[in-house]
Amino acid sequence: MTLRRPMRYTLVALALVLAAPVTGQEITVLASIRTGGGGVGQVLLMDTALDMARGFDRRTLITVDSPQNKERDRTPLLEGRRAKRLAAAGDWELFRALEDRALAKALEKAESKGFRPVTLRRDLRNEGASSFTFTWGKDSITVRLVPGKRRSELFFRKGKDGPERRLARILPQTVEGPDGPMDMGANALREVALVGDGRVLLLVVGAWDAQGGQRIGWERAVLLPLKKTGRLWKLPYPLEPANDEWRTP
């Protein structure tokens, strides 16, 4: 499965993330479709609201425009009275089986519309990385996240010691901690992916911390068009990184 879609924006405004209360959340890149030039298209994401106490995570499919990162559709995999009844009864296995079945059907439907899996992607959650470097032949770009109390910032750097430019600012998010709401600024890259046939870089950024014995945190997707960077630094466009630098789903 895959995804893609439109543009015209300011990069800083594009990636500015507004605060939204959560207790625990993960964003997973699933598929994309390209519908126009410049990487214009749509991306299919899975938003998982984590149930830290009982394990009844709630998964929701989200379709966003690329590269504007504007949400187009949001569909929970399992909702209504049955979901509440299963959770109340503690029937985790049936709850998860029904969600898995709904996910399989949703992916089939998306594939019939032209979506294809995003294979140029890498999960960085186990690495806790604040930067990631990918190469094209002798060229390389490092994307790095610089945490801050008021805002975190994303930068591109060419090569090891080359020029650098700021791409986006990311505002802190409000999460429900053990002692009440608290603001957490983005402190790590969670996933990186190329969509729009190598014309848009998709980053999942987030913040996670152990509070009162529980892991709390949030994740958000940021989509960054690559045409300006490619032209500025004379990089191939669209970009095609070495396959061994990426894990496929």
Image (cartoon, grey):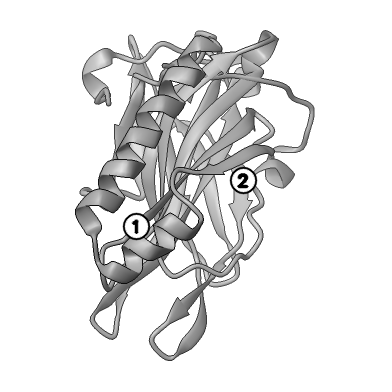
Q: Position of residue 177 (x, y in %)?
A: 42, 81
User: Could you say whether the residue bearing mark 1 is in a helix, strand or loop?
Assistant: loop
Q: At 31% across and 32% down in the image, what residue appears?
A: 122
Q: Nearer the viewer, residue 119 or 143?
A: 119
What residue type is disc 1 on?
A: Asp
Q: Nearer the viewer, mark 1 or mark 2?
A: 1
Q: Residues within 10 Å of mark 1 (few under 14, many from 20)?
A: some
Q: Is residue 19 above or below residue 96?
A: below
Q: Which residue is mark 2?
A: 168
Give the labeled residue for mark 1.
Answer: 57
Foreground: 101 or 168? Answer: 101
- Quadrant in which the C terminus appears: top left
Q: Earlier in the sequence, mark 1 or mark 2?
A: 1
Query: Is residue 62 found left or right of 26 in the rendered image?
Result: right
Amino acid type, label 2? Ala
The correct choice, above or below, for 14 with respect to 184 in the image is above
Residue 64 vertical placement versus 22 (above, below): above
